[in-house]
Amino acid sequence: MKPLVTTIAALSELATGLSPDAVSSSEVLFEFETEELYFLLAADDDESSQRVIVMRDENSAEQFVPEHLSAMRRDVLSRMANFAERARTPGPLSLPRQWYQYKHNNFIAFRAVPRGVGDAKITRWIAEVSSGGRVDIIFWKTTTSDNKSTLEAFESRRPNVPDIESPWLQAMAAARESFSQARSQPSDVEIRLTALEHSTTKGWTYEQWLEAVSKEQRDFIQVDTDKSIRLRGPAGSGKTLALTMKAIREILSAREEGRSIRVLVATHSWALAAQISDSIDSMGLGIVDEIEVFPLLEIAKLISPQYVQDASSGFSLIGEDSLSGKQAQLDEIQEVLDDFIAGDWITYRESVSESLRTRLDSDSEDERRALAWDLLIEFGSVIGAAAIFPGAGSDLRYFLLPRASWMLPLSERGDLRVIFEMYTRYWASLDKRSLTTTDQVLADFLIHLSTNNWNRARRVDGYDLVFVDEFHLFSPLERQVLHYLTRDTSVYPRIFMAVDPRQSPSEAFIGLAADGTLSSSGAPADDDLGDVANFELTTVHRFTPQILELIKHVHREFPTLDLGQEWDIDFAQLESSQADGPLPRVVAAASRSGEEDDIARVVHELYPLGRMALAVVDSRHWGRYSRLASLLGRSGKFHVSTVTGRSDIDGVGYRRRGLIVGPAEYLAGLQFESVLVAGIPDMNSSALGANERTRYLSLLYLALSRAQGKVRVFVNEDDGGMPQVLLRAVANGLMEAEEGSRV
């Protein structure tokens, strides 16, 4: 096969689990071939992007990884992208110990997949890091324990790489043209979606919206701002809209009274910040320069830019906002944790408590991920927030910190010593590669906010009112930062927080493993805020009463997520403001292939009605649904987009037509006229643990809550048939059952 020339961005996209068959229909990937080379580029790549060249085996049926590793494609691609990122960082290349690296000149060998992944023999990549300014990477070949190859021997007989300079420029030019056309030209089937209830496409003014919102939303919008307010409501209840309109109302009131005002709307991600900014722009108010809408990390950049990208220090930030930053930090902490357990853990083991020892000894991937999350909170919101850095005597400062109920339970001095040792290694790993994290930036920022300089400057640079969307996703460290951003130090901060009671912060990042976490990112929300008023939104505007009744039914099937009393909400009080619609329908097929035929049939049926989604509940089934997405896209009848990661949401959030296909967890924040739900595992199986069942019910709830008008749920006998929760919904008259394909 031709050598593959690609980039880190393209490898990372493949590593999300995207099926190779779906590459040609991806909106963020582009394929290009010459006589000697095959290119795979991502939408944001340019001529200066770091290149990754993969010398592929001849006659291989696998496109992107060695054929014997195809079952572990996602892990292989993820490690390749990780290696390329580490290689481009200035300074000596350093890999985690568990990669078992071996170097010779510019060549390096390392394990192709994490230890314990798959049943394949130990496989190692032989890679080369170019010495030029671009730092291109060549993945030459893999060797196994049965067929070892030394770097010295390989260097003496390595083949030549075809010239890529001119074809690279050709590929880039073709990619730019392709992505430009995709953005400017509609699909051959363009169906305009009926205006959504909270969509900026309505084109309504602020006054029109004020007449249209519910009484609960209007009460919140018009309430006095003499105290902080927590706005609570489930998906579809209009929290973001109400929060946005409240901010606008305070600006309009200040204008009428002739007083100046500065308002901040803080978010967890750039995607949500862009959505809110577009909403404000669409309300016909002209330039609203009294309001700033930014991720919290961007506020740190604006007020203290030296903390983020100091050119003289040479440090780079991992993650562009708290959302991407947390995921990057989790990956780093997981590497440190695995390395520590494989190495020096044995010397600490007898000095720690039994509870921590059990967690560190566990071979369960979910338990390791849960521990990594707890370490993320401990490193950022406890140690980092206290400005404790590795060094002589710093461990003693950590040992003396008071413990709060939301922190990781550490009962022994040995527990604290082990945690601080991993923190030291985490810091050293980042420092060696000249990296800094969003938590480190915010911890430094918090120190700045505590100074006399900021106490004086905040009178001018601070904000009169602070609005926070998705407050439940903010860590204790981030919440502390919010407290210092208001202008007037003589009164409690006035912060207005929108909270979704059904979203667990840790679940958003580590899925089912969140059930094993022992610390909480939900530190007391009212700390340092004085008297906080609660507003409940009990009217949902997104979906019909029939969909709401099904969502209530699913809600009653699993316990409220353990986020504490303040997050509880009475779903029995919820009502829908929408007109009646058809009953949700469950389609039961005899086989997986039959289910796919049923999905294709319903796509043809519902596509003309507006934007639709295919939400996959169990991501382990993602491969076959991404292949189905590819087939539907290639038919030429549908505009099909796949969402394989959180970053993809930016590109599809405002698209008003077409079919969006993705794991249910990545569709949060989007809404559709019709939602097709598939990939439901055998939830009737006794082998499925209670935590797993709860997780899948939670994802089913999330998928259903994306729909505005129509819901179709697909099940098949190969995957266990119709789960009890849906059988009971049919029996209770909340769903219609339909016999699907019998093939």
Image (cartoon, rainbow, N blue to C red):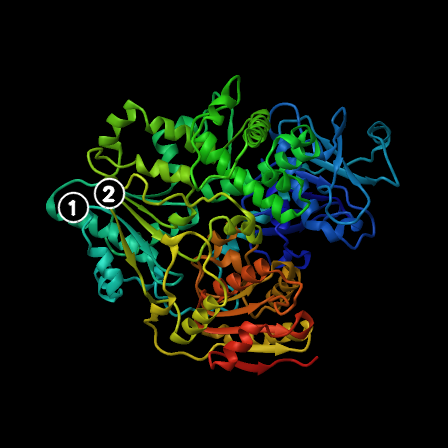
Counting every numbered tag in the picture gives 2
Determine whether 168 is above or below 692 in the image: above
- Horizontal side of residue 741 vs 149, given as left or right: left
Q: Nearer the viewer, residue 426 or 728?
A: 728
Residue type indicated by callout 1: Ala
**In this picture, residue 351 sits left or right of residue 119:** left
**Residue with the mark numbered 1:** 254
Q: Which residue is rendered at x = 32% and y = 27% of the image? A: 450
Residue 663 visible in image: no
Q: Earlier in the sequence, mark 2 or mark 1?
A: 1
Where residue 699 is drawn, which disc sits there?
none
Q: Is residue 686 above or below residue 146?
A: below
Q: Position of residue 281 (x, y in %)?
A: 30, 52
Question: Few, some or many C-alpha atoms within 10 Å of disc 2 (few <14, some 14-19, many ≥20)?
Answer: some
Residue at (51% x, 61% y) in the render: 698
Name the residue nearer the viewer: 378 or 307: 378
Circles 2 and 1: CB atoms closer than 8 Å: yes
Name the residue that disc number 2 marks. 290
Pinpoint residue 206: horizontal percent, then vertical percent.
24, 58
Q: Position of residue 549 (x, y in %)?
A: 42, 73
Residue that extends furthest to the top in the rendered view of this protein: 392
Pick whichever, 544 or 728, lies toward us.
728
The crowd level at tag 1 (other Cα within 10 Å; few <14, some 14-19, many 20+) is some
- Considering the numbered disc 2 on the image, is that residue within a helix, a strand or a loop? loop
Looking at the rendering, which quadrant does residue 551 occupy?
A: bottom left
Report whether residue 316 is seen: yes
Three-letter amino acid code at disc 2? Answer: Glu
Q: Secondary structure at mark 1?
A: helix
Quarter of the picture holding the C terminus? bottom right
Query: Looking at the image, which residue is at 64% across and 50% down?
Result: 14
